[in-house]
Image (cartoon, rainbow, N blue to C red):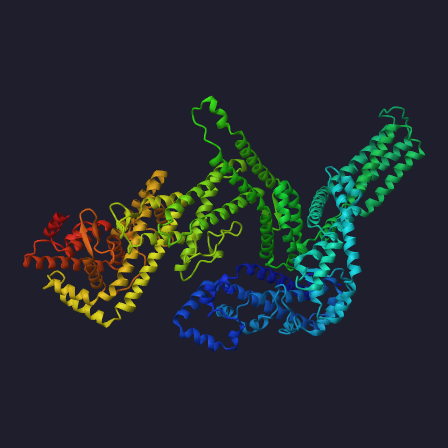
Amino acid sequence: MVDFLAENNLCGQAVLRIVSRGNAIIAELLRLSDFIPAVFRLKDKSDQQKYGDIICDFSYFKGPEYYDSKLEAKPDLQDLDDEFRENNIEILSRFYLAFESVHKYIVDLIRYLDDLYEGVYIQQTLETVLLNEDGKQLLVKNIFNYFIKMDRGTNYTCPVCLSSAARSSADSNLDDICKLLRSTGYSSQSGAKRPANYPESYFQRVPISSTFISMVIGRLRSDDIYNQVISVYMGITVNLVEAWEPYKAAKIALNYTLDSANIREQASRYSVSMEGLRPQIQQLLKEGFLREEIVLDNIPKLLNCLRDCNVSIRWLMLHTADSAYDPNNKRLRQIKDQVINDSKYNPKILFQLLLDTAQFEFTLKEMFKQMLSEKQLKWESYRTEGSERMTELAEVFSGVKPLTRVEKNENLQAWFREISKQIESLNYEDSTAAGRKTVQLIQALVEVQEFHQLESNLQVCQFLADTRKFLHQMIRTINIKEEVLITMQIVGDLSYAWQIIDSFTSIMQESIRVNPSMVTKLRATFLKLASALDLPLLRINQANSPDLLSVSQFYSGELVTYVRKVLQIIPESMFTSLAKIIKLQIHAIMEVPTRLDKDKLKDYAQLGARYEVAKLTHAISIFTEGILMMKTTLVGIIKVDPKQLLEDGIRKELVRRVAYALHKGLIFNPKAKTSELMPKLKEMAATMDGFYRSFEYIQDYVSIYGLKIWQEEVSRIINYNVEQECNSFLRTKIQDWQSVYQSTHIPIPKFPSVDESATFIGRLCREILRITDPKVTCYMDQLNTWYDLKTHQEVTNNRLFSEIQDTLGTFGLNGLDRLLCFMIVKELQNFLSVFQKTILRDKAMVDVFKAMLSAVNPVKGIVANASKVYANAVAKTQKIWGPYLESIMKVGQMQILRQQIANELNYSCKFDSKHLAAALENLNKSLLADIEAHYQDPSLPYPKEDNNLLYEITASLEAAGIHNPLNKIYITTKRLPYFPIVNFLFIIAQLPKLQYSKNQGMTCRKATDPVDWSPLVLGLLTLLKQFHSRYTEQFLALIGQFIRSVMEQCTSQKIPDMPSDVVGALMFLEDYVRYTKLPRKVAEAHVPSFIFDEFRTVL
């Protein structure tokens, strides 16, 4: 009969493919479980308030019209729904495809069973498939996969979101999928009651033939079940006491096993077994005990020992696991307590046995692999040696080769020569015949020694003994079979502990902390745990499925993650020691001066403190040595390099500590009388310097590039936090799994927000904006300093940015700059929205603008009765200038901060890396020259669209501070009617609130009506920069006309002094030219030079 899993057996291949797909789907569901968007859980109040109306459960399908009408009634809610979908559609689509594949899997299984019933597979029926061992396993596995996938699916389902994802699928089975995966009411939480008729009603959603289920149960009923706690798949444990509770017959049958005396007997048996096995396994692991001849002579004994160890470990692990018992179930608690007491359960002793067993298993496997690889070579070597010994002995009895007291004997000569030929003729390929013949040859050599009285000659006896020894070795070697390795693999299976093993993590870490060399034994345990990968991969591999690689990567990745988790205790311990070292170096050990009096030598020696530093440093070296003892290991399909593991562990611990320090250190109290900004920055700088110095100290002792790691990880932390902070300004947000800065192995921790900011960089930025707020401070451009409007005391100055540079480095300043860019964009967008929706829709305002345009036309002329015309227009538009001024000054304030950051970055770049600064400046000038040349002559080269040069050089220039924030285009804009005249009226409306001072420039007249000149000018300049240059031209022309008209009126009225509003307008033009670095003729095109001459006398 054809093998059930043979390629030409269509029935076997069909069910194999279904099981293979089932295993792949389970891996995908487990993988996706780590990527459920946090917002789906609605744990935070803010999430509940924001998304509660758009994330619904299955009640949505009872009345979809109600939910849809609620969305349509509120445009904001509809916009939020669209934004939510845009942000999550990629991961939702993947969830939907996974759930769709669950449905398809079940449909395909039912179709396969129907085909069996209908006789599609010739000579195969359900009965014949169940009689076959592989067939029985595959059908049972299909039922199991069915339940597991549905259970996993219902845990992750959000129907409305699935509906969104299904829209992108051409062939959607949404109704069937929702029916299959809707909640069952079952909860795995402790104390939760099982819903009525669960899981029977669950399976009825897509019913499978009851005949099929009955036949499978009938086939399984004959199999033995030894435990009440069983592992079903990749460490998923089930306690039959709880699972079989609703089933009367099964419950009665199980109760015989759960008799108190029976539990005591089983627990005591495994307790005694463990006590006997521990010394036995430790004896086998002694150095030099497991030699090749010992192993070959005792294969059955060694395998029995291995089997006993694994059976004891399995029983004790499963029956003492917390996950197997519901603490709210009294009977389960009693059973667990009895098992623990009667087995004298000690987790440390059990773990030690697991360690020793894994080490013994690993050693034995490696020896067998080595022996298998050398098997034929050694067998042929022994055969040659034995044959040569017989040839030499034949020559001895020929009388030609002299040997003490050996007479010539032609019979023996011929006999030994024949034996030599017989040995030489043994065939390795025919191992059975060769084995029998070898035994006969050994017997013949024993007999020849007895019958021919050869015992008297010791040398001849030695030759015979050596030959017999080689023949024995040949028998041992020919018995080295791969079946032993297969048996060890089956016996040593640890898949049941895939999840339970985590309960031993603390014991593992404590063992490593006490003895770092323990890592070598743990290596064997991790490799033993890797054997669990065979379970999900076996059928996938047999089916030649393309899913093999992705499923292998998932489970291997999970195991490597666990290895990293266990070994993370080493970097943690190292950093604990480092903290003590740095504390001693900073606070205890005095720096030795260049010249030192000998009577003070003892004071500076500080032998106690220095000994403590040496002791701690040695401990760090020992930890490093411990992890490096773990050789490069293949865990599943992922190669684990201990040096890389150490470096990643150090990076992870550094990231954890630095991220936590930044989170805790940069929290500000906005109600504090004096700002906490500078003191906290200084404190944070000292903390960061401590981390930096510790890394500088450690790098040589652990053989890592300390400075490289420091810069890479600190930049990653800051960039990630900037990215997360900027997410609040983005419609399509960057998720953690999409971030180039986030890492699976070296994750950057996320902390709950303490205010409106999501991260420390947001808190820092908002604190700077708070203390430099134009409504309460005045910025002096000449001094780069902010002063309090009321007290006139200095609030902060450009030293602030040097302090940020000392604390967060270039990455921090650059990140702050990026965040300010996003804030400026948001402010400009809000401003334009208000301009379009409020100002341009106010008919009264539009009429004022129209009247004003006609009054000032032509712009080159003079406005008659200027003071009255301008004053009336300003008075009529007064109500709109409050929010207008606030937005403009906010933008200007942020532009000042960006300028200060650029100055600090450029200064530090030139100081710390002058060659880089010079190279960037020259490259920038060259590129600009080439671009200008191209526009003059299009035949000259220009970077193509797919060339990233301009994008990349821009990022480098901004990081080096070689850019002007005022020249940046932040938003794309459309034509806006009345835009120049509105901005003109706005600026002249603010001029009466300002006054000119020779020492301070333009300052606010009243602290109660604050207007800060620099933010005002820069904000307006930035706003105009976002539009076509003709708007700026028209705006400047209107200001020029205002100056000429008011001056003309003053001349006609013989007013000698230049009006303050004209001084303000001229100051605006002066500052505009200065900030934009444009030639003076831009301003003089609108204002006669004699007015500027008179203005300079005022200055």
Is residue 666 something one can see in this rendering? yes
Q: In terms of depth relative to the viewer, which is nearer, 197 or 958? A: 197
Residue drawn at x 15%, y 56% is: 1062
Is residue 124 something one can see in this rendering? no
Of all residues, the one furthest to the top in this rendering is: 598
Q: Quadrant of residue 364?
A: top right
Residue drawn at x 20%, y 61% is: 989
Q: Position of residue 863 (x, y in %)?
A: 11, 63
Q: Quadrant of residue 445?
A: top right
Q: Position of residue 308 (x, y in %)?
A: 76, 51
The quarter in which the N terminus is drawn is bottom right
**17 relative to 962 in the view: left or right:** right
Residue drawn at x 87%, y 24% is: 404
Q: Position of residue 452 (x, y in %)?
A: 93, 32
Residue 977, compared with residue 619, is above or below; it is below
Residue 435, compared with residue 1041, is above or below; it is above
Residue 769, compared with residue 620, is above or below; it is below
Q: Position of residue 626 (x, y in %)?
A: 61, 40
**994 relative to 73 in the view: left or right:** left
Residue drawn at x 90%, y 32% is: 412
**846 relative to 744 in the view: left or right:** left
Q: How many marks?
A: 0
